Image: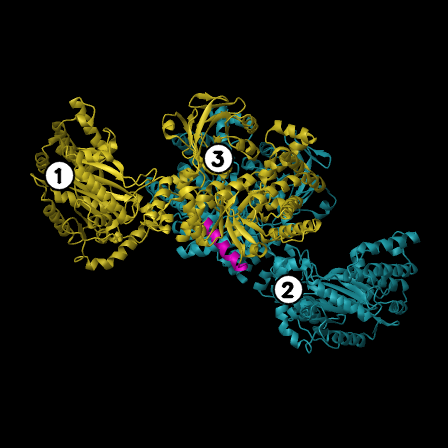
Chain colours: A cyan, B yellow
Amino acid sequence: MATKKSARRSATRKSAARGSSSKTVKMVYSFGATKTEGKASQKVLLGGKGANLADMTTIGLPVPAGFTITTDTCAAYYDEGGRFPKGLVDQIKAGIKRLEKETGKVFGSDTDPLLVSVRSGAAVSMPGMMDTVLNLGLTEKSVRGLAELTGNERFAWDAYRRLINMYGDVVMGVDHHHFEAAFDKVKKDLGVKADTDVPAEGLRKLCDEYRKVYRKHVGKAFPEDPYQQLELAVEAVFKSWNSDRAHSYRRINEISGLNGTAVNVQVMVFGNMGEDSGTGVAFTRDPSTGRNEFYGEFLVNAQGEDVVAGIRTPQPLSEMSKWNATVAKQLEKVRKKLEKHYRDMQDIEFTIERGTLYMLQTRNGKRTGAAAVKMAMDMVKEKLIDRKTALKRIPPNDITQLLLPSFDPKQKASAKAIATGLPASPGAASGALAFTAEEAVERSRQGEKVLLVRKETSPEDVDGMHSAAGILTSTGGMTSHAAVVARGWGKCCVAGAGALSIDAAKGVVTVGGKKYGRKDVLSIDGSTGEVMVGEIARIVPDKVSGDLATVLSWADKEARMGVRTNADTPADAKRAREFGAIGIGLCRTEHMFFEGDRIKAMREMIIAESTIDREKALKKLLPYQRKDFQGIFTAMKGLPVTIRLLDPPLHEFLPHEVKAQKEMAKDLGVSFKDVERRVAMLHEMNPMLGHRGCRLAITYPEIAAMQARAITEAAIACKQKKIDARPEIMVPLIGTRRELEILREQILEVIATVKKEKKFTGKLDIPVGTMIEIPRAALTAGEVAEVAEFFSFGTNDLTQMAFGYSRDDAGVFLPEYVSREILEKDPFQSIDTTGVGRLVEIACTEGRKTRKDLKLGICGEHGGDPSSIHFCEKVGLDYVSCSPFRVPVARLAAAQASLG
Amino acid sequence: MATKKSARRSATRKSAARGSSSKTVKMVYSFGATKTEGKASQKVLLGGKGANLADMTTIGLPVPAGFTITTDTCAAYYDEGGRFPKGLVDQIKAGIKRLEKETGKVFGSDTDPLLVSVRSGAAVSMPGMMDTVLNLGLTEKSVRGLAELTGNERFAWDAYRRLINMYGDVVMGVDHHHFEAAFDKVKKDLGVKADTDVPAEGLRKLCDEYRKVYRKHVGKAFPEDPYQQLELAVEAVFKSWNSDRAHSYRRINEISGLNGTAVNVQVMVFGNMGEDSGTGVAFTRDPSTGRNEFYGEFLVNAQGEDVVAGIRTPQPLSEMSKWNATVAKQLEKVRKKLEKHYRDMQDIEFTIERGTLYMLQTRNGKRTGAAAVKMAMDMVKEKLIDRKTALKRIPPNDITQLLLPSFDPKQKASAKAIATGLPASPGAASGALAFTAEEAVERSRQGEKVLLVRKETSPEDVDGMHSAAGILTSTGGMTSHAAVVARGWGKCCVAGAGALSIDAAKGVVTVGGKKYGRKDVLSIDGSTGEVMVGEIARIVPDKVSGDLATVLSWADKEARMGVRTNADTPADAKRAREFGAIGIGLCRTEHMFFEGDRIKAMREMIIAESTIDREKALKKLLPYQRKDFQGIFTAMKGLPVTIRLLDPPLHEFLPHEVKAQKEMAKDLGVSFKDVERRVAMLHEMNPMLGHRGCRLAITYPEIAAMQARAITEAAIACKQKKIDARPEIMVPLIGTRRELEILREQILEVIATVKKEKKFTGKLDIPVGTMIEIPRAALTAGEVAEVAEFFSFGTNDLTQMAFGYSRDDAGVFLPEYVSREILEKDPFQSIDTTGVGRLVEIACTEGRKTRKDLKLGICGEHGGDPSSIHFCEKVGLDYVSCSPFRVPVARLAAAQASLG
């Protein structure tokens, strides 16, 4: 607990200076019609909520009056060893006096009692802080005043019992279920079921019971002095600042430099004081479409929680003028004022107490991706904001919603969900079930729409995955093979739906006791992970066009980093280019070995016993590779294409099952025993750390030589057709300078040889670089850069090795690690800036020290993740590379990163 | 090739300054009876050999005269773009003139020709440098002079043909086999087989043939001007400095700051000029026992190579006085002079030409471990050297020879070797073959001596491994399970003997077409990897005693770092303590779960579906663990014992085969299906990066809790018996600060609870720390140290993850990586200081920044490797920990590291 202690100690030290002057210091800041002392800019002193309330009041919104106790006061409380600093009690009293004056009500009065709410409010909102206490100021005496004033005895006793419950629970830590039990007993005695059926008298009795519960568990009577109530509540807020949860949240989120929390005390207003009262919530613009229309609803004679509870149906805001035209007009004015002041769409809460409008809260409203884009565009047009602000305001991840199909919400709402997996690749897909890749290919060819359902996928399945409308797996995480490949294609995928039990041989999926076969259609939502029965209609949005295209063109002007794409086929390359990619950052070549005859030649190569046989097999692969590259260079003409040499271990290209191995033996004309032996020889305990990447190229130089030849021949063929091919060769899994040196020399030799053979004299520079994905490569980047023209960070593997987590296996503990906050985020989704990031930083700094013009990029999954992109900007990468469908996201995120 | 070029460029730059003054500079340093210009200290200028020759001459040894061309001259040669600097030819001529004067012979003379040798000699010896050329100065003319002078025509022509061959090969790069072919033809023509059967006339003809070969491949005639011969030879030495091999050797070994190589030209002397001539080699002390006796042999009328060739049997040196008492006495004087001067045992070569003794070479002699210890001790007694020098002089690895059994060399020489594997754990063992662990246990129990022969071993086999006399595996490397466990015990092991084909079911090993079964005895030499047929007698040396004990006691006084041991049982702990360990640095607890009933309870725990069932099973394990720990604490009383919590993934404790799984199901009273399902669930793609170490403890806190309880209860039980138990708890596989924080809190809670339960009020501090074995832990050590009282570097895993090499799989490419010098050494044997070492350094620096008194140690295999121990000293570790049998090695290495 060293940190907690030292954090506390440091807080103590800091405020020791303050201590001496705390006697005369201003601890309470008022806001209200008669006096508003705080400013929007005083967030550190007044907390977020306090500053906001002061700000709202200042611009003339009808905010219930109140005051804020400063964050410094909280610090002083700790300095004093957990006692109120001198003068605080007086200042609080003065604050209450002002409220009494402003409202004409009296704190604790038995005729017109002033009631207040107490809320915590630090500069940054965090969990673990004290919940709200409402109706504070009610006592045995004042509750009768409230009943009289409102003419509603039930309302008064209900407010009182709520206070005792909340106060006991939140301020005194009495377990909520003790109160529940008392309530249940009262209801049972009265023979009613719903809380709302309990009459006034029952609630009065309940208040007696609640006070007994309170006394029993607190050891003291419920305070009948409203000031005592208030002081204890304020202290509870101070204490919650150092709760374990709040502490660990600050540590994990690296929130430091805060003194403590502020406390907000505010006059209660009630929307349930009769038919002239009401309550509502609204957005200043439509949060789902972004249209500039007031959007919200209200409920007459109700409290805020009634809206949430959903027992009564609220009316749309457009109906309000029928009920109270004055208030409706007032609210419309408030809307305009808010947007002009905050220059953003606001999410507001309001209450009308006896015909008077009160604004309870305003904050920037949440919105869909589409709405975010439209609002940003519109507000620029309306001159509310400039382009940079507009760019900063759109959450990059949300714009994928504009690019992917989604289910019709109405149809989806009535669909039957049978399981939930991980939202591995967004989108929406329906299809009949196919259980093998071959089946998916075959049935798709015949025009059927199928979902490929597998326990997990492997490179052998790629064809089937491509043919299928969507992919559903029962194991594997967000970075499993299925997930990564699907995201690359923008194809919908739900992974790791553990509830599914798949019997591929029988062609049956069992889930929840029900069976689904080849003829059954399921629908999967890749954005939520849901698996549903039957076909659901989809909404397919446009490509990058309209407002989004405009916004992204602004983004490109601001972004320092370029955005490339990870693409392995001409089709992907073309798509990514349409999405704005300015090159390919990662072209994996292994997928190219699986189609049709290629896999046969590949297996021939693997089974070969000698270099000569291997070369023979490789010669068969050469024309395929050349053609692939030519297609990709053509699609990307004028833009760089970074090609990664063969990476996976060879056993990935051999069939796993005996049957398939026997077929393979027959196909290749070798004995099954030979195949079996080779499979056994290639078996690895930890394939992730095995014979793959450049290690293959070192052992079998002929493989890399074939690939270098195919690349060079393809580039020359393009050039001869006046197509500006710009290949770059990337060697994977480098761990030592010498590996790259050897391979680089070999590659350059092949390039020179091919040029000579083809008598090519034009300009064709093919830079040779490496992925930095092995920790040691990052740690020795200064050396590696001597022989590398570029680095591309392979942060998937770098994360695996830096953490010692296998992506395939970490699913057992990683979710728990994230939920228990051992890790802030899944490090495969968002780069771990502390550990993995440090390796990246070391490599950038030391690589550039060796080679000033070293080109730096990232091509792991993180290349499409906004927060990782911010990190990339910080360490000075030249580009990020991500799957085609993430390119727009990355363009926007890169711009935001540049804007800081 | 950036480096090579830049290295060359920098050499050029450096000597540009020298260029201007090179005209007047002294380039040739003479040595001989009349003039010796160099000094022993001028190694950089004269090279190692040149300085040595000057030194030998100076102290009055009868060294054949000669001169050395400086290393600066070599640099100047490159400065001049590959030409001799001005004045060099003249200086060489002057040098030759002096030799003529001193010997009375004339270079190229047809009556009494002066012959010289030419040798390269840089300051550091390195491969790729030019080989020696002998007999230089012989020409068509002078060869006749030599024949006349010696009265031995055959000798003269033989010398000449050797010159042409060597010169053509070494200086001009003519492939040796061209000369061979010519020789074969001559022999065929003469109808003789051996070279020695060719008469003088035949050799004369051969010289003609050789000159034809020379002319054909060089394009010019063999130079008949001796000066031209000499100049070309000198240039060839200069050129060899920049050969690719020499270059890459310097790069890999980080040799920089050298200008070039020196060239040594020395008068030839001949031991084959008749019965008054001879040649020999000797050691100034016995290199195998270390006894202070002159040890060597000589051959009359012979050249050095005849001794090596082994055609004639040399006489022992003790016989020399019978042949020539004067020379024998002279040699004895030389011996004394050498030892007094070099203060070390010398390995010398000498030649007697016509009754005159010449010393050709002296260098520090190689010796066995036993000899090294004895000589060091004796020389301290003789006041030749001080203790520090003595310590520095013993190669730490060699002293293992004093501690382990070895085969009787005579018996071994006649044994039949059938295969060679890796020398995984030194020692020697013979036994009948046992094919399973159970069999090994059973047969050993019945008094039979068995070798356990397995494809590979796993933790299940530990009992059998322990029972066996030795372990032989057909797969796996130097750090395979078998190797690591065997080394830990000092038990002989040969691993990865790939030639063996083991059929465990049938109980047969097939190798080289022959079969060996349960009744056959094999012998394995763990120091060489040899596998031999039949039993071979062994020599079993004493434990640390005698001279070695004295030397190690000196070592302990010099060493800053302490040496702990990796031990998991009281027996190991005791043994290590006898070897001088001052604590246990790594006590693995997983081995404790395999014996007898324990594995059953362990499996019950693994198969458990709920925390309650798991706790029930763990309760059964508790008494076993407590007893184990009590035994270890007792053995190590007063010394710290660092216990690592459970590390391996749970599936390692389940049987792999269906049959065993069925038995297990029966044993535990669960269905086979349940077992099968659990095994499937626990299966991992990359177990190395999976659910193990602290990740287990996070998911199943009850396991760690049981272990913490067992440790605390054992410690208290010891304390109550007045045994000073000093446990330290080490959490494995930490990757984030938060993991350790959570576990540490849990552990401390258990300790407090147990103390309370046992009403223990005495002093019992149990520090909690972590292994640093995940790169991320090293990179964030500053944070981790906030909650760790010590770090112990687990450099096995750290190496695996930093390099991305799986120890189990890297055998496919690692040997090639080492042989091709992609890696200098196997990083699992000797720490990679650049990459892995950097992580260690970061962790040390930043860990200590957070916690000044953070205790730092290492417990990977590297803890017993001398060069890694040097690294540990450099980064400031407090201790190294290694297997019991490596403790003496580590003590010596730690002292050497301290001495710098």
The answer to whether residue A561 is above or below residue B630 is below
Highlighted magenta segment, given as a residue range: B836-852
Residue B849, x across and y down, in percent: 52, 59
Dot 2: element: helix
Read off the chain for label 2. A
Q: Nearer the viewer, residue B275 or B104?
A: B275
**Of the pair A366 and B31, the residue shown nearer to us:** B31
Q: What predominant SS class does the magenta segment belong to?
A: helix
Q: CA distance from mark 1 to mark 2?
A: 90 Å
Q: Which amino acid type corresponds to the residue marked 3 in the rendered image?
A: Lys
- Residue under pointer 3: B491
Q: Amino acid at mark 1?
A: Leu
Q: Chain of mark 1?
A: B
Location of residue B684 by image quarter = top right
Q: Are marks 2 and 3 on the same chain?
A: no
Q: Which mark is residue B525?
A: none
Q: In this rendering, would B607 be left or right of B310?
A: right
Question: Which residue corresponds to mark 1?
Answer: B138
Chain under callout 3: B
- Which one is nearer the viewer's eye here, B399 or A836? B399
Farthest residue, direction bottom: A24
Residue under numbered circle 2: A8
Q: Could you say where residue B437 lies in the image, as x and y percent from the top left?
A: 55, 29
Which class describes the residues within 10 Å of circle 1: few (<14), some (14-19), or many (20+)?
many
Marks 3/1: CA distance?
59 Å
Amino acid type, residue under disc 2 in the picture? Arg
